[in-house]
Image (cartoon, helix red, strand yellow):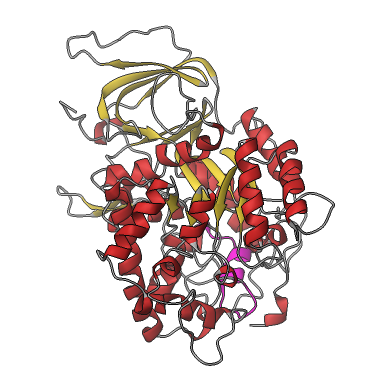
Amino acid sequence: MSLDRRTLLQSVGLTAGLVALTPSAANAEVLTAADPTPARGAKEGAGPFKKLVIRGVNVIVGTGGKVVGPVDIVVKRNRIAEIIPIDPNAPKKRHPRDADHEIDATGMWVMPGLVDEHVHTGTGNTPRTYAYKLWLAHGVTTVRGVTLAANADAVRDREASERNEIVAPRIVNYQTPGNGWEDGQVDSPDKAAAWVAWAAANGVDGIKFFGDRVYGRAEIEVMIAEAGKRGLGTTMHHSPPIYPQLNAVESGRLGLGTVTHFYGHFESLLKEGREHPKPPGYDYRNEAARWRGVATVIEYTHQPGSPRWKAYLEEQLSNNVTFGPTFGVYLAGRDLHRVRGLEWHPRFALPSIWDFWEPSPQAHGSFYYDWTSEDEASWKRFYQQYLQLIHDYKELGGRIAGGTDPGFIYNLYGFANITELEMLREAGLSALEAIEAMSGNVAQTIADPRGGKPDYGTVEVGKSADLAIVPYNPLDDLKTLYGTGTARLDAESGDIKRIGGVQWTIRNGVVYDAKKLLADVADMVKAQKEAGACRDIDPDWSTYGPCGGNPGADIPPPAQPSARPTAPTGT
């Protein structure tokens, strides 16, 4: 593999601090990150309707552990107008009978459209529509871009999505300090205040801080304060260079809204000093060294259950800090072969993103070119404590918000959301709590800076019609939410059959066939391959990817009414 192929992705990646690969095969019919998002086609989704009725579903509400059903849900235009419990003595043709569109979802489940607290697009020069369709295909109806794209692109797509002009989830636009304006880097408190004022006037919903930029604690403190005055949200990736100035508990004292990733948590729990010791020759710019250094921090911290551990969590709770763990994006650290071989990659990963994922000392997140079993063992020990930290914060009453940081380290859009639900379950959240963490919790986190209640994130009357309809109960098995489904034994035939996947995603009242969205993505992968994008892929490393010999898992067929589970009673 030629390492000089890797370049900075100027169009979107630079603004998010990302590195990406421009595909070697240029073709006018193959979209890239720089291209505008295509308009919604005539056959892409149906509605919104004057009156839509979803029949016979069981409902995961998305807050308070509520599950109800079976019910009929009435949607008028883009709003949930009624949720009507089904009377077992009612006639087969129930009211209302004047719908201009009905979905027979008898025995199926409805849950709120998933809300992701941490996303990007453009990695590997992938077009935004690629991410959008994968998200919607997995029931993701709102994303908080941190950053999603350059400000002008993110604002344009956010507005087009609200008008149902493109196939996309709702977009919440966070930008990093200095993005979008023409006055250079934010390198002083005065410029920090000026940029926040500019951001608030130019379509920015919130601020994403890093810890390795020209701005430091003084500027971050000003920006958090100014964001609070203007109703903007804040989240921070505490990159290691910031540790001499700021860790997660100190950011919480300044009023930070969300600590995303694990950075800064354990530095707040060190027994001594502001950073844990590093091996000789450690260089933060060397990503393999950097990622090895991350996991060893737990050797120097106060342990779970200790007074300092509890005090840290209690202080973050008192400051109303949300934790966004993004567990799934780091799974290669503890099991590289597993994430490389995920069954959806051959069919749904674009060659350009797979090329970006290949090991390289030059591409962000592609740090595993010399990754060893010793490294994985270190990361497995680290995960044990990180999972415990999130569990303990949840038990204390702290808010956990689900996010994925997709597009890096074999973490594919949409599929990553279901992986994150499984990881939240591993951390000790129930399946219901995991779904709430990636729906109502994130929605409330996004709404908090403006002091209101979210318009989405739960299945309740008056809320936006952002819903996912699934054939199988996800509380029994979260794996049934993957676009490629999961395996089940047919007791009668003895055969293994693939079942699951979201059936319909409703976004802003528009009904999308989730299987069709996945088929669209598979066509995008095929088109890029036919344009020659596989010619620079290293076959020795990429056996499992889109350019290898493994065809990957197909989309499971839609569930037939006769095969749907029976609706539970008494829920």
User: Does 237 sit above or below residue 195?
Assistant: below
The structure residue drawn at horizontal position 52% and vertical position 92%, both measured from the top left corner, is 280
The image shows residue 263 at horizontal and vertical percentages of 48, 65
The structure residue drawn at horizontal position 17% and vertical position 54%, both measured from the top left corner, is 494
Number of labels in the image equals: 0
Along the line of sight, the residue nearer the viewer: 571 or 105: 571
Q: Is residue 420 left or right of residue 50?
A: left
Residue 355 is inside the magenta segment:
yes
Q: Is residue 430 visible?
A: yes
Q: Is residue 413 visible?
A: no
The structure residue drawn at horizontal position 65% and vertical position 27%, both measured from the top left corner, is 163
The image shows residue 447 at horizontal and vertical percentages of 51, 35
Identify the image quadrant of the N terminus: bottom right
User: Does 561 sit above or below residue 556?
Assistant: above
User: Does 224 sit above or below residue 571?
Assistant: below
Along the line of sight, the residue nearer the viewer: 75 or 344: 75
Q: Is residue 245 left or right of residue 431?
A: right
Read off the magenta span.
Answer: 348-363
- Furthest residue toward right: 182
Identify the image quadrant of the C terminus: top left
Along the line of sight, the residue nearer the viewer: 196 or 391: 196
Residue 45 is inside the magenta segment:
no
The image shows residue 277 at horizontal and vertical percentages of 46, 84
The structure residue drawn at horizontal position 68% and vertical position 56%, both measured from the top left corner, is 219
